[in-house]
Amino acid sequence: MAGSRLEKFGTVFTRVRDLMRSGVIRPSEKPIWYDVYQAFPPKRDPLHVKPHFRPSTKKQDAVPEIFYREDEVRAKFYEQYGAGTRPFDLSKSNFVSTCQRFVDKYTELRSRREMDDSALFEETGKALLTEGVVLRRRGAPSVAAESRDPVLELKLTDMLAEQQSVGADSKETVDHSTHTHTP
């Protein structure tokens, strides 16, 4: 019983009283408060009730959101250029993604020049292009529209309609030439 310190098995007074009755505590070693408590017991026995915490209740986190200036640049980069065509090569320890190169160059140019964000963003794209990093805008064609061959712009339905009209014209000319030469 001496190893059990749980309050649900009795009050401190009842446990000390029982230890004295069993002889574990001698009457000369009883606590100072024992005689006072025995002479003036409380009107209600002290009862220890453990507070019930529900694990489903959500506690408010005191940790503020961490948001860096580089995160804004990254968000704008991914919005304009997307994730790119190549996957990240995480097997190399010195791998630097295109987005990270862009952010590094952006911060370097921002420290050197005083520009607004949009101009600095464009300037960073040009600076990376001179270094050999090709950035493709999201949704933009990979080749400029004016450099394309006009034949490539034709739609399949237009081509079929044109072939059918040419075929019909040649058939009419053949029919027309056969009718004119017959006596």
Image: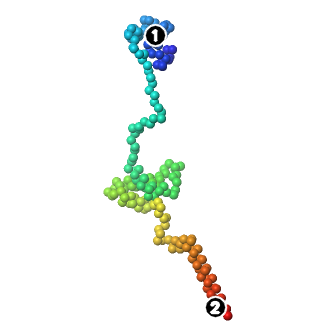
Q: Is residue 24 above or below residue 140?
A: above
Label ID, residue 180: 2
Secondary structure type for disc 1: helix
Q: Which one is in front, 59 or 30? A: 59
Identify whether 156 is placed above or below 127: below
Residue drawn at point x = 61 percent, y = 80 percent? 168
Q: Give the residue pinned by disc 1.
A: 17
Left of 155 or right of it: where is 11?
A: left
Residue 129, which numbered label?
none
Amino acid tagged 2: Thr
Vertically, is 64 above or below 50?
below
- Frontmost of labels 2 and 1 is 2
Q: Nearer the viewer, residue 147 or 157?
A: 157
Dot 2: element: helix
Distance from the alpha carbon under mark 2 to that under mark 1: 136 Å
Q: Which residue occupies the extreme left position in the image?
A: 114
Q: Position of residue 16 (x, y in %)?
A: 45, 11
Does residue 51 appear in this view? yes
* 181 in relation to 50, above or below: below
The spot of residue 174 in percent (x, y) is 64, 85
Question: Which kind of residue does numbered mark 1 sit on?
Answer: Arg
Q: How is the image coloured?
A: rainbow
Point out residue 113 in the picture as x, y percentages from the top left corner.
33, 57
| Residue 123 image point, x, y percent | 38, 60
Residue in the image at 49% along x and 51% along y: 95
Q: Around disc 2, counting alpha carbons within 10 Å, would you say few (fewer than 14), some (14 to 19), or many (20 or more)?
A: few
